[in-house]
Image: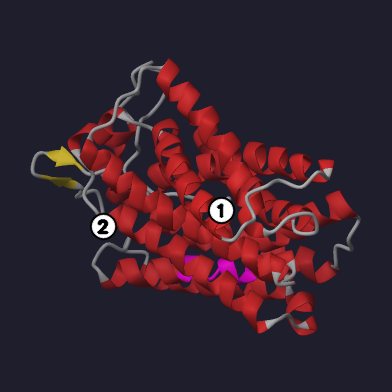
Amino acid sequence: MSFLRHLAPALLVTMWSSGFVGATFAAPVAPSATTLLWRYVVAAVLMVVVVLALGRRYGPRYLRREAVLGALGQAGYLYGVFRAVEEGLPAGTAALLASLQPALVAVVLSASGRGNGGGRRQAVGLAVGFAGVALAVGPDVAAGAGAAGALWAVLGMLSLSAATVLGDLWPAPAEAEKHDVLDSLAVQGVVALGIFAVLAFASGEAAPPADPTFWLAIAWLVGLSFLGGYGMYLYVQRTRGPVAVSTWLYLTPAVSAAWAWAMFGQDLPLLTVAGFVVSLTGVLLTRPGRPSGTHQIGRLRRDRSGDGPVSMQAADLTRGGAAARGGRVRPPRAPRG
């Protein structure tokens, strides 16, 4: 599991970036509500079958908390991104606007006293990361896009930011220590399915198109974006903290452009490559220092199978290790890609 912990940020960036390409892939053949409904029909059913087979059980407090985080971090965020692409916003520009999230999360957590104490170095890293993002997608921004698309992308970013911050500030129930990424994906996926079902049926867009490209896009979005992207998001947040996981998302615009180059033969400008390097520099600057004692203790906890850490505490990072309240540690839960 230590190998996965070191590889997880790279997997997060790669898989999360695939979502922007998947949205572009599906946009010509189906409306956003249709694509998102069927994405979650497949994903939620799959997750429910798995957790039922494993005999997982959830209490009302856990379900309530995960439902709110899923509504914000999955339904709200994805609907904003998909509507932005549907309105004609380029995938790189959508990724740029979504990547404003790290700075917002860092500012909010710092204002609430939950920051990780990175101080000036973290501020510089965030600024460098954003500069790299702007450089990577500069051509898209210069070309311009509709105001409606940009607004939807910003709303999606705000929704994911709210889920990330809330996952850190909202005390988790004691039973959350028994659950892991699989449980969060299952509960949040079912909640997102319910929300998108309401949207799709209300707009008369529930029926899938006959175009086989649609189902290829669904397979892409479920396998890479949902299981890979959101799974790694949750895992990295729990092992490295909410500011760290948000900051890694700075790399997604450049990687989204690389996905588009590989999938659609789009040009990969030199500025995009340069922006990737600058963004990576910003990410490295924002990495937290040596974990505190409490976090090291948290790293020794194992899941029920004994194969790896369970619910690594982001709170241990963001509060300098002082994560215990009332005799139990509060593991944050979060959505997202």
Looking at the rendering, the stretch of residues picked out in magenta corresponds to: 96-103
Which amino acid, by three-letter code, is at mark 1?
Phe
Q: Is residue 11 visible?
A: no
Q: Label 1 neighbourhood size at 10 Å, few (<14), some (14-19), many (20+)?
A: some
Count how many numbered circles sit on residues in the image: 2
Element under label 2? helix
Q: Position of residue 69 (x, y in %)?
A: 37, 52
Q: Is residue 33 left or right of residue 187?
A: right
The residue tagged 1 is 201
Which amino acid, by three-letter code, is at mark 2?
Leu
Which is the main secondary structure of the residues drawn in magenta? Answer: helix
Front residue of this view, candidates 29 and 227: 29
Q: Residue at x 60, y 35 (%)?
A: 42
Q: Earlier in the sequence, mark 2 or mark 1?
A: 2
Q: Residue at x 77, y 84 (%)?
A: 142
Q: Position of residue 304 (x, y in %)?
A: 33, 18
Quarter occupied by residue 260: bottom right
Element under label 1? helix
Q: Position of residue 91 (x, y in %)?
A: 72, 64
Q: Label 2 neighbourhood size at 10 Å, few (<14), some (14-19), many (20+)?
A: some
Q: Position of residue 74 (x, y in %)?
A: 49, 52
Front residue of this view, candidates 52 and 329: 52
Q: Is residue 92 left or right of residue 281?
A: right
Quarter occupied by residue 94: bottom right
Q: Residue at x 44, y 73 (%)?
A: 123
Q: Residue at x 27, y 35 (%)?
A: 176
Q: Is residue 6 visible?
A: yes
The residue tagged 2 is 169
Residue 127 against residue 157 in the figure, above or below: below
